[in-house]
Amino acid sequence: MSVALSPSRPVPVTAPPRLKPHLWTLDEYRRIGRTGLFDGVRTILLDGVLYVMPHPDPPHNTSLGLTHEILQRVFAAGHHVRNQTAFDVGTRNDPGPDLAVVPGSFRDYATRQVDTAVLIVEVADSSLFTDTTTKAELYATANVPEYWVIDLEHRLLLVFRDPVPLPQGLGATAYRTHRTLAEADTVSPLAAPGATIRVADLLP
């Protein structure tokens, strides 16, 4: 006995829903941090995206420590140097700079996060691209007048100055002046023009 089979019918295909990543606000990021979820892990927030930073290696730690000591001497009065602490830029960013030279004393920020600085420094090994693009734009947007990137791989100091808005429609701010300094060069911070720092002294 034969059985007639019904011709197969195509199954209607519907487009899957368009998935969107959740972009974290600064407030959400801070609330998660208070739960202890990030204990022992260094994180930053860039344009709403949460990144886990790699553990720094000895050259990074050495350069960070050397630079911290030098900046503490240079900015002995009227400012203080913050080491890998929060820095608010807008509502979706906390780039967590390696060092920030901030007006006033630590006690001045007992009830609020830092959102201004006269100088920010990043020590870059694997993070060089982000430090010189995304982070540079964020610090310029926060009107930080001077930003340094210590390039460990090439043993250079990259100096960014003069934050200015980009042409209308781009909706961003960038540094107009870029300088590349070698080990034998010296630099004087804008906020401490009487000080002279050897680039070699910032490097491991």
Image: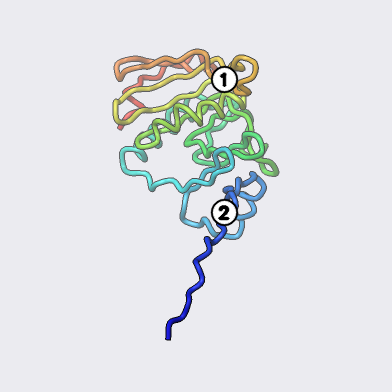
Give the answer, above or below, for where 102 lies relative to 197: below
Q: Looking at the image, which residue is at 60% across and 25% down?
A: 141
The residue to which callout 2 is attached is 16
Is 180 positioned to the left or the right of 16 in the image?
left
Q: Looking at the image, which residue is at 32% across and 18% down?
A: 182
Is 58 positioned to the left or the right of 88 in the image?
left
The picture places residue 151, in percent across and down from the top left corner, at 35, 28
Q: Give the quadrant of residue 70.
A: top left
Residue placed farthest to the front in the image?
1
**Mark 1: amino acid:** Pro
Residue placed farthest to the right in the image?
111
Q: Is mark 1 on a helix, strand or loop?
A: loop
Give the mark nearest the N terminus, 1 or 2.
2
Q: Do the residues labelled 1 and 2 touch (CB within 8 Å)?
A: no
The picture places residue 7, in percent across and down from the top left corner, at 50, 67
Mark 1 burial class by Cα count in 10 Å: few <14, some 14-19, many 20+: many
Q: Which mark is residue 48?
A: none
The residue to which callout 1 is attached is 145
Q: Looking at the image, which residue is at 31% across and 38% down?
A: 59
The picture places residue 162, in percent across and down from the top left corner, at 55, 14
**Mark 2: amino acid:** Pro
Q: How many marks?
A: 2
Mark 2 burial class by Cα count in 10 Å: few <14, some 14-19, many 20+: few
Is 53 positioned to the left or the right of 105 in the image?
left
Give the answer, above or below, for where 112 lies relative to 165: below
User: Looking at the image, which is closer to me, 25 or 43?
Assistant: 25
The picture places residue 101, in percent across and down from the top left corner, at 54, 29
